[in-house]
């Protein structure tokens, strides 16, 4: 209806009292002569009279035009009473007035009660906790549940008599139909001034209001009959229930559905016929609360299900596993060990690793010393004798470490460790399944066996490193004793080995071994097994035997024994310790070429037998550049089980100079650059000099090629000073030199001092490097700047299953550059090394191109030499040969059988040349792939000297004939080389009065 309650501009609402400040009209009175109460009874006001609308003379209006005669509104025929749906219940009856547009006041007059009520100024229809007082002369609404006096409610569903209008409701005027859902009209769109207190609805709206007022009057009189449907003034949604006991029963809610709408026209009308306010904050809050309640309800239910599953499922799994899974016994685990077969690359046998009856089990627990039992329990499972086979705190700690990465292990008891030795538990099950089995079977075996019996089985089957399975073999491997003879400090070493059989070995990493040793002793004190005053006597592990001393296989040659040890070490670092290999019975296929290996042994031993004393330790390692596979490995001969000199870090001397060149190239300094090669020089605050008789043709203008061929020290120190010593170390690391070496004394950073600083002497090879790593670094240069991890293991093959490749590491490039850039860096570096072998008369047969460099390092501050090297590579093979002298674990000066000191260009170069020629026989001659230059590539010739009447005098010292007896090979003469056969590290010194040493870099004593 277009009354003022629907005025959007004013925001009026029937629940908003006096929106415009108008005074509230007096309560309406039923007009005299009004219609009588309905015959069916109902709440009636005293003094109510029957009759029509006020001002209608008590007569019903005639039938509207166009309606069949006598037909009532709603389509009922003449004489038939219409069905008025939605009759108000007593609780909804408010005693409201009968609206009528005839009550509108004329302009200038006081507002009529109807206007005030339509304008929302009647407090009776405002939202109020209590209903308004009844008009004078009327009683208040009856209490809930009581019938009003003077009438009865009609029976449910009973219609008024046919042909009658509903009691109290006048007939609609002619041409008037019930008004439903009339569109709202904003106040600002209504033309002219609004009469005070009147709704400007028009004649039709006034007629509709008149019909609605009659219906409202009937409802107010207590009539139980229906009323005209869907009129906004009489819909259920528009009637406020003053008897609601809760605000939620308020049909209006807290929303104002008469606000502005973007359409500017009619408000959206819902299914109820009332405007819908979709932006009501109360509705939104209610919806949010409902969503939150539903969400939390689902969460609670999910938690209940998860909690139930967390109890029921583990219980069922535990019960099933207890009866279905079989726990291993000691004999089963002992019988699982199989020999390990090691073969050459062609599958011919190289070595076999087996127990050979060395496994001797302990039959009684008293055959193990008490300190050893106590140390084992303290280190591995302090609650062993009281727990049910597993430890809840240990499991929680293990789970915490697993998810946070803040620790290692700590979850398995001694019983669990014995259980998981069973192969079937470790073969294919994921970690969480293995853990479940460990717990269930640990509980089962604890109920079936005595604790001492479980401890004995554990001691007989645990792996202690060094190939020692069981406590008997471990006591022999580390201390050469029986288990009953082990003392407390020795027990602390053995008990600490089980956690990390390799890392806790004092011969592998003394720092880590000391940490573990002290931990075990402290745990013994904590658990009451060792007095504190006695524990204070031991702060470091006692001396142990050599790692292989306890089981030397005399059937192997010395070099086979060293290869076997390196193979097992390599696999252990890859996660396959000897215990695992034996349980699977693996066959190990190596990369060692049997022909190449024999050639290496022949070259090394033949030279040593003829000219070198027994204290000379020769090592040879050959690496395939394209794969990193070690093709030949000779660790110094000697006795079976002797020290492996191929992995002994020693100073490489001048053979490290190519990495200074590489560092310069990385910074754009080409090999055509010239440097000051004079001697002596103070460079970076340190005095450096060349070897006696070694200098460039023009000492203060020396090219990189000439300096590399003649091994001019000062040139390369100047390069290192120019690019920075750390840059030289970075170049070597990029080529494959490791950044750290592990040893019995702990980890040691390479290519730096103890304080972390790198000195300029790095260009002269002052820092120790292993021969295998030098061979691999040269292999990187020969392979166009692409490096591989040097390795001896091609693959391992289990008894059942497919071969397993051990090394699948991605190929690395120099400085992680693109392959093209890495190739340029590599080629420009080796281009400075092409003349070295020929100049030393150690070139290869058939004119095979080779990049090489000799190296000699000074022995302390003397004229003697400590180490001598020769390293060189073709595209097919890179080989390093190193020699040093060692007596009783101490380095001594290098001397041959005649007592003469020698350089890298002599005996090491002879061994290298013999081996390389033997290996390359029958192989295609491959050339190094050329690339573009970096920086200044070619040497820049000097301008011609000025014309003079006197020939220029030479400042070069006189040369002398070489004292070496070996026949020179065909040599390519390079301009500027001078054609001299003396000087450098590969010929005897030329005649000179110079006394400066050839390398002033400090010498490191090895083996002390």
Image: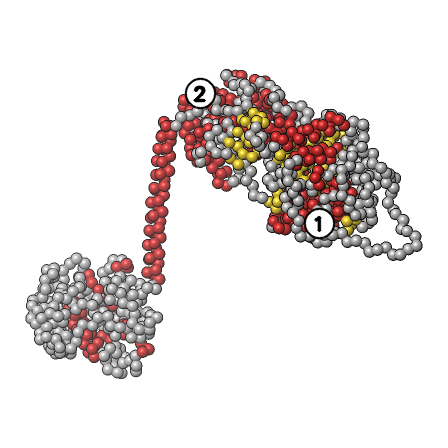
User: Which quadrant of the figure contains the C terminus?
Assistant: top right
Q: Which residue is rendered at x = 88% and y = 39% of the image?
A: 993
Residue beneath disc 1? 664
Q: Position of residue 870 (x, y in %)?
A: 72, 37
Labelled pair 2, 1 in contact (Cβ < 8 Å):
no
Query: Dividing the picture into quarters, in which one does residue 910 lie?
Result: top right
Q: How is the image coloured?
A: secondary structure
SS for callout 2:
loop
Crowding at mark 2 (Cα within 10 Å: few <14, some 14-19, many 20+): few
Task: State the residue position of label 2.
Answer: 450
| Nearer-the-camera pick, 357 or 224 | 357
Horizontal side of residue 29 vs 455, given as left or right: left
Which of discs 2 and 1 lies nearer the camera? The answer is 1
> Few, some or many C-alpha atoms within 10 Å of disc 1 (few <14, some 14-19, many ≥20)?
many
Q: Residue 548 is drawn in which quadrant?
A: top right
The N terminus lies in which quarter of the figure?
Answer: bottom left
Q: Earlier in the sequence, mark 2 or mark 1?
A: 2
Question: Vertical placement of 367 versus 185: above or below?
Answer: above
Above or below residue 434? Residue 151 is below
């Amino acid at each position: 209806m277009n009354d003022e309650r629907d005025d959007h501009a004013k925001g009026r609402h029937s629940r908003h009292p006096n929106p415009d400040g108008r005074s509230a009209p007096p309560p309406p009175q039923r007009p005299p002569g009004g219609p009588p109460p309905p015959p069916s009874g109902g709440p009636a006001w005293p003094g109510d009279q029957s009759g029509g609308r006020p001002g209608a003379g008590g007569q019903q209006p005639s039938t509207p035009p166009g309606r069949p005669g006598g037909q009532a509104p709603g389509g009922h025929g003449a004489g038939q009473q219409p069905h008025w749906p939605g009759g108000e219940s007593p609780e909804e009856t408010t005693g409201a007035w009968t609206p009528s547009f005839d009550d509108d006041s004329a302009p200038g007059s006081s507002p009529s009660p109807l206007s005030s009520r339509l304008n929302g100024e009647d407090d009776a229809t405002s939202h109020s906790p209590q209903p308004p007082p009844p008009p004078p002369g009327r009683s208040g609404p009856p209490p809930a549940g009581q019938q009003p006096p003077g009438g009865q409610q009609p029976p449910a569903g009973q219609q008024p008599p046919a042909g009658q209008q509903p009691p109290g409701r006048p007939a609609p005027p002619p041409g008037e139909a019930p008004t439903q859902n009339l569109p709202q009209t904003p106040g600002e769109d209504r033309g002219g001034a609004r009469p005070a207190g009147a709704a400007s609805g028009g004649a039709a709206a006034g007629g509709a209001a008149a019909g609605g007022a009659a219906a409202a009057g009937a409802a107010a009189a207590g009539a139980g009959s229906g009323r005209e449907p869907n009129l906004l003034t009489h819909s259920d949604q528009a009637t406020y229930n003053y008897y609601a006991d809760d605000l939620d029963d308020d049909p209006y809610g807290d929303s104002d559905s008469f606000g502005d709408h973007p359409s500017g026209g009619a408000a959206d009308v819902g299914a109820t016929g009332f405007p819908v306010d979709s932006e009501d904050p109360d509705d939104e809050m209610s919806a949010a609360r409902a969503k939150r309640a539903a969400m939390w309800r689902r969460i609670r239910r999910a938690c209940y299900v998860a909690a139930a599953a967390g109890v029921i499922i583990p219980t069922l799994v535990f019960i099933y596993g207890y009866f279905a899974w079989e726990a291993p016994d000691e004999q089963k685990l002992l019988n699982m060990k199989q020999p390990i077969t090691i073969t050459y690359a062609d599958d011919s046998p190289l070595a076999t690793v087996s127990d050979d009856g060395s496994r001797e089990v302990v039959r009684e627990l008293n055959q193990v010393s008490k300190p050893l039992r106590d140390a084992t329990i303290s280190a591995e499972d302090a609650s062993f004798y009281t727990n049910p086979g597993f430890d809840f705190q240990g499991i929680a700690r293990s789970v915490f470490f697993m998810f946070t990465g803040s620790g290692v292990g700590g979850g398995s008891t001694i019983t669990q460790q014995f259980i998981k030795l069973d192969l079937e538990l470790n073969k294919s099950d994921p970690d969480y399944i293995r853990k479940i089995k460990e717990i269930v079977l640990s509980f089962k075996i604890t109920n079936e066996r005595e604790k001492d019996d479980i401890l004995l089985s554990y001691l007989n089957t645990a792996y202690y490193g060094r190939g020692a399975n069981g406590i008997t073999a471990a006591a022999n491997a580390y201390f050469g004793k029986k288990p009953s003879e082990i003392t407390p400090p020795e027990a602390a070493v053995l008990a600490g080995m089980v956690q990390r059989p390799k890392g806790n070995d004092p011969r592998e990493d003394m720092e880590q071994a000391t940490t573990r040793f002290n931990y075990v002793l402290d745990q013994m004190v904590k658990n009451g097994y060792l007095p504190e005053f006695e524990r204070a006597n031991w702060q470091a592990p006692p001396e142990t035997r050599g790692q292989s001393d306890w089981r030397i296989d005399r059937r192997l040659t010395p070099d086979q024994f060293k290869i076997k040890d390196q193979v097992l070490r390599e696999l252990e670092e890859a996660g396959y310790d000897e215990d695992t290999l034996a349980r699977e019975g693996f066959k190990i296929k190596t990369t060692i070429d049997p022909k190449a290996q024999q050639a290496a042994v022949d070259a090394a031993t033949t030279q040593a037998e003829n000219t070198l004393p027994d204290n000379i330790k020769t090592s040879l390692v050959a690496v395939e550049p394209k794969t990193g596979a070690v093709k030949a490995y000779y660790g110094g001969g000697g006795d079976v089980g002797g020290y492996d000199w191929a992995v002994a870090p020693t100073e490489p001397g001048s053979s490290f100079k190519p990495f200074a060149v590489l560092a310069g190239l990385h910074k754009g300094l080409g090999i055509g650059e010239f440097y000051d090669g004079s001697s002596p020089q103070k460079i970076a605050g340190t005095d450096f000099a060349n070897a006696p008789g070694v200098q460039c043709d023009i000492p203060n203008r020396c090219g990189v090629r000439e300096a590399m061929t003649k091994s001019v020290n000062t040139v390369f120190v100047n390069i290192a000073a120019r690019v920075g010593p750390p840059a030289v170390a970075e170049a070597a690391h990029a080529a494959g030199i490791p950044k750290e070496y592990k040893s019995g004394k702990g980890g040691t950073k390479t290519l730096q001092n103890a304080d972390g600083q790198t000195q300029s002497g790095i260009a002269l090879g002052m820092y120790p490097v292993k021969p295998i790593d030098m061979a691999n670094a040269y292999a990187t240069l020969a392979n166009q700047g692409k490096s591989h991890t040097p390795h001896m293991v091609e693959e391992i093959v289990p008894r059942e299953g497919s071969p397993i490749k051990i090394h699948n590491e991605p190929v690395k490039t120099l400085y992680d550059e693109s392959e093209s850039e890495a190739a340029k860096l590599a080629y420009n570096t080796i281009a400075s090394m092409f003349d070295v072998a020929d100049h030393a008369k150690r070139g290869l047969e058939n004119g095979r191109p080779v990049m090489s460099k000799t190296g000699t390092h000074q022995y302390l501050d003397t004229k003697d030499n400590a180490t001598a090297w020769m390293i060189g590579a073709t595209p097919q093979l890179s080989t390093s040969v190193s020699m040093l002298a060692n007596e009783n674990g101490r380095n001594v000066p290098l001397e041959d059988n005649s007592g003469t000191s020698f350089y890298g260009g002599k005996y090491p170069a002879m061994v290298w040349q013999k081996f390389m020629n033997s290996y390359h026989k029958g192989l295609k001659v491959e050339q190094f792939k050329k690339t573009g230059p970096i920086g200044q590539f070619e040497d820049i010739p000097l301008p011609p000297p000025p014309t003079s009447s006197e020939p220029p005098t030479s400042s070069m010292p006189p040369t002398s004939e070489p004292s070496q007896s070996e026949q020179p090979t065909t040599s390519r003469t390079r301009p500027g080389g001078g054609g001299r056969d003396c000087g450098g590290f590969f010929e005897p010194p030329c005649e000179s009065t110079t006394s400066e040493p050839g390398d002033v870099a400090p010498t490191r004593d090895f083996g002390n």
